[in-house]
Structures are given as C-alpha cells and as structure tokens.
Image (tube, coloured by chain):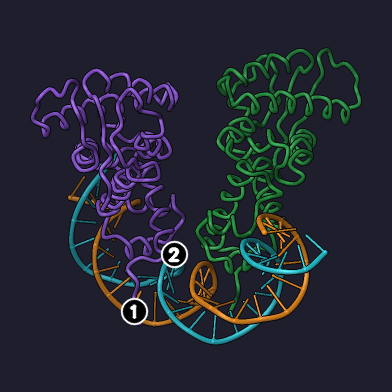
Chain colours: A green, B purple, C cyan, D orange
DNA sequence: TCTTTTCTGTCTATTTAATAGACAATTGAT
DNA sequence: ATCAATTGTCTATTAAATAGACAGAAAAGA
C-alpha cells in the first residue's frame, strides 16, 4: 500500500532514459531530441516514459541533478581529510572531483556542445563554486588578508577553467598529470586547505 | 495466453545483463564473475537473472551468439553488392564487418583478455571463416587454380590476424586506414570479390 | 497556403517481468 | 575445519511496463 518514491527498479529505468538522452543530445542536439527518440533508444514503451517524467525537460533536469549532486557527494568521500593540509603536501587522492568527472565523462562531455542539456553551462560551474564554498577552507600564502568569499569564487572558477579545457580536449592529459597541474597552480596562492566535514 | 519467447522488454533486460557481464569480465576475469556481481552491476534482482538464464555460462553463450550473429548479419546489409567487384575498385563501403566490430568494440575487446567469455577465442575466427565461406566468392589473380576451401580459410584467417591486431592495439589506426590496409593486402592475391546474396 | 505526417500528453485496462524472501546445497577463503 | 558467501530452485506478490486509443500541437511536404 505504501508507494515508494524511489525503488531500484525505478532508478534503473530512469538511468536508462538519462543515458539515452545524453547520447541523443550529442548526436542531434537537445532541442531536436523527441520523447519518441528517447524511448526508441532506451527501448521502452512511450507510456513508460510518462510514468516517470512529464517531458524531456524534466528528464534533463533529473539527469543534471543526478550528476551534479553526485559531484558534490564525491568530494566528501572516501578520501576526506580531517586536518588542514599544506598545499606542498597535496596529493592526487585529495582530488576526487576530478576522478568523478573522469568516471562520468560521457556526461560531462556535454559541456562541449552548444545545444545541450539546459542550464548545464551555468550550473556546472556553480556547483564547483558551491563545493569550494561549503566543503573547503583555504589559507592564503603568508596569511595575506582577503575576502574569503571572493577568494573562493576566484579559485573555483579558475579550477573550472582548467576542467573545461581538460574535458574539451578529450581528456588528453592523464588524470594524474592534470591533478599535478592543478596542484602547481594552487600553490601559487594557497598555503593550506582544510576539507570541511559533512556533519 | 501466448507466451512470447522474445519481447522488447525481455531483450532489454538481457542486454543489460550482457553488458554487465562484458564489463565485469574485463574487470576481474570471467571465472571470478558471480551471478551476484552481475545482478548488482545491472541493478536487477537476483531472481530476475534466473528467469532469463540458468547460470552465467548461459548468459555468456547468449552474449557471444548475439554478437557473432550480428557480425554475420552485418555483412549482408546495407552495402550488399550484386555483381563481382575487382579488388582495385574495392571501397571502404564493402567492409561492414569492420564497422560492426568497431561499433561493438566494447565487446570485441574481450579477445585481448585471457580469462574471458568461453569459446570467444575460437568462435570469433570461426565466424569470420564462415562469413568468407558463405557470403563471399573470390577470384584469384590471373585465375590461378586453387582449392577454394583452402583459399577462403587462408584469407579469412589472414584477415582475422589483422583484426586481432587492430583490436589489441586499441583501434589505433582509424577505420578508414585499417580498411585501406586490408584492401592493399587483398590485392596481392585476390582479383575480384562477389558478395553472395542472402536468398 | 493547405495537407499530411509525426509527435505529444493524457488516459484506460492488462499482463508479466521484476521483486522479496525462504531454503538447502555448494563453494571459497582463512 | 569453519564460516561466510554464493548458488540454484521455489513460492507469492506487485507495480512497472505494455498496448492502444484519443484529440490537439507541431513539423514536414506539396
């Protein structure tokens, strides 16, 4: 009698629709993707689509949220640090944002398209910023006094710029090399990082 | 009242199990893949697995058949030729075996693994041979008389050797370049090809 | 422009694939 | 030798998925 909002079965079906939308968006651009295209690709009945989503925009929103929420959560675990870490000791392990994006590159490649998932181009960098705001604490080199809000925005968008390039070039440089580059640039003005706990 | 042997819904579920098995086999080797692994990966209930397959071996067999049958069928269409074609006029369009393998490279990469889908290492080349036997007719350079059974076996396994290398090197050379190479080698002893119709 | 086709969103009724869970037997690892 | 995990088989249950109709909107063609 209790109808579940989320079950393994529902999630599975939704994921298949999400994957279909991702591929179709790359193929023909989001605006020209039809619900029929999606159900044909995912091999479901058209009725099934409407039991889960109102239209393709709701599906796109769901897809976007799934991956951006996933990105947020990926930061906390499993390599969460408890004390502050000097940037000259930063290791690749700290950067699970990067590995998350790489693992889900099939989705994040969508930022290289113009006619793509709605709001992706704004909400992806916003999410990076949110992570910086909520999950990290920074210490400037020589304790230079700065407005930390601005500093976080500055470094977050700097990082976003590097990420965009990494994605757009088809992940040419390896994860490890890319992380090294990010660390090198961080050291120019960040003395230490603290990863803020979830609770 | 009539129970269908194959429905879109069944096929879809089976495909998901097949994909899960493919990935897991690459990850940990076929012998150590469990049914539990498969259902966890594909996100189905374990009971569901047994409504479709007896065990992982039956799934493997199904997967193997799907792709080898697909390969057979890919030859006939859509570029089936009706008259004989001189090898110096062979074009890339004739080689839909190659494009099929490339499109399904996620599966065919399994030949680069030792502990892989049972019988793949023998049945893949056997299928290539079967295609040569049933779908092609050859004409040797200068009409040199040969036992055509042997000739087909010889050229089929030669082609298989090239394919194996192409797959093993991670599809380094492009489809087009690879096809050109195959054509060049074919010309050394094949004067003409005829694609045999299905019916 | 008008015509035709395709797609949409919403709605039924139906069914069957998927689920949950128990069970003893088997396997694998320590 | 022991313990945990997995297997294969079996129930009963259910809700996701299907089939299909419908009028209206949108897109494509003439």
**Circle 2 sits on which residue?**
B9
Locate the C terminus of chain A and report the quarter of the image it occupies: top right
Letter of the chain that mark 2 sits on in the rendering: B
Circle 1 residue: B2
Mark 1 belongs to which subunit?
B
Query: Badge 2: few (under 14), some or many (20 or more) residues near its Cα, within 10 Å?
Result: few
Dots 2 and 1 on the same chain: yes
Q: How many marks on residues?
A: 2
Question: The residue tagged with tag 2: helix, strand or loop?
Answer: helix
Q: Position of residue B126 (x, y in %)?
A: 19, 38
Q: Residue at x 31, y 38 (%)?
A: B29
Residue B191, horizontal then vertical, whole percent: 24, 24
CB under 8 Å between callouts 2 and 1?
no
| x, y percent for residue B196 | 25, 43
Q: What whole-number distance in Å separates the C-alpha atoms at marks 2 and 1?
A: 16 Å
Q: Determine whether, in the image, residue B104 is placed left or right of residue A40.
A: left
């Amino acid at each position: 009698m209790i109808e579940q909002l989320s079950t393994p079965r529902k999630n599975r079906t939704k994921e298949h629709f999400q994957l279909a939308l991702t591929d179709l968006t790359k193929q023909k651009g989001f605006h020209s993707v039809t619900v029929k295209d999606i159900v044909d690709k995912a091999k479901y009945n058209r009725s099934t689509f409407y039991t889960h989503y109102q239209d393709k925009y709701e599906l796109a929103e769901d897809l976007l949220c799934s991956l951006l929420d996933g990105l947020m959560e990926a930061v906390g675990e499993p390599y969460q640090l408890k004390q502050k870490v000097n940037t000259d000791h930063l290791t690749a392990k700290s950067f699970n944002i990067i590995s998350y994006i790489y693992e889900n590159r099939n989705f994040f490649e969508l930022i290289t398209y113009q006619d793509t998932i709605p709001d992706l181009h704004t909400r992806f960098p916003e999410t990076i910023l949110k992570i910086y705001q909520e999950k990290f604490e920074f210490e400037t080199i020589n304790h230079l006094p700065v407005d930390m809000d601005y500093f976080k925005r500055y470094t977050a968008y700097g990082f976003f710029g590097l990420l965009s390039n990494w994605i757009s070039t088809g992940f040419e440089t390896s994860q490890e090399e890319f992380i090294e580059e990010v660390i090198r640039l961080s050291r120019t003005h960040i003395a230490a990082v603290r990863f803020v706990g979830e609770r």
